[in-house]
Image (cartoon, grey):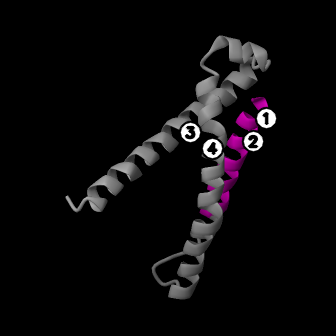
Amino acid sequence: MRTLQLLGLVIAIFAGFIGYYFLSDVEPDTSASAAGAAGLFLMFVVAPALLFSAVMVVPSSIALFWPQVREGNYFQGKFWFAIWGCNCLLSSGYLFVAVYIFYLWLKVGNGN
């Protein structure tokens, strides 16, 4: 459980930094091919990394709400609770995005 929490946070931070690094050079006068390459990088590297992070972080963050699970996985101390707090914020963001995408799928898919 601790490994999932820590690895999920590290992957999310890495995906954020690498996404920022690749998008920071895209400006209005950037060629279309360079901007397209940055978009492809986001689609094939950053988005899957964030999805992988979400798959690790969301279920483990929800499971850690039960004290038995925290005690069984030795999830104690300020450091681990800080990691859990950061991952709870990430999880709420991931869940918000998932609900929003589902809402858009319902609206666009049904033609309403």
Mark 2, residues whose alpha carbon is within 10 Å: few (<14), some, or many (≥20)?
A: some
**Circle nearer the N terminus (3, 4):** 4
* Chain part drawn in magenta: 1-20
Q: Is residue 30 above or below residue 86?
A: below
Report the Cα–Cα distance between label 3 and label 2: 13 Å
- The disc, 4 or 2, on the residue closer to the chain's N-terminal end is 2
Q: Position of residue 6 (x, y in %)?
A: 74, 36
Q: Measure the alpha-carbon separation of dots 1 and 4.
A: 13 Å
Q: Where does label 3 land, which residue?
A: 90
How many dots with numbers? 4
Asked whether disc 1 touches disc 2, contact meaning CB atoms under 8 Å apart, the reply is yes
Above or below — where is 60 with respect to 104? Answer: above
| Label 2 sits on residue | 7
Q: Are marks 3 and 4 in contact (CB under 8 Å)?
A: no
Task: Say what amino acid the circle numbered 3 marks.
Answer: Leu
Three-letter code, disc 2: Leu
Q: Position of residue 33 (x, y in %)?
A: 55, 87
Question: Where does label 4 land, which residue?
Answer: 55
Q: What is the crowding at mark 3: few (fewer than 14 residues within 10 Å), some, or many (at least 20)?
A: many
Residue type at mark 1? Thr
**Callout 1–callout 4 Cβ contact below 8 Å:** no
Q: Distance between the residues labelled 1 and 3?
A: 16 Å
Q: Is mark 1 on a helix, strand or loop?
A: helix
Q: Which quarter of the picture shows residue 107? A: bottom left
Residue drawn at point x = 67 percent, y = 26 percent: 82
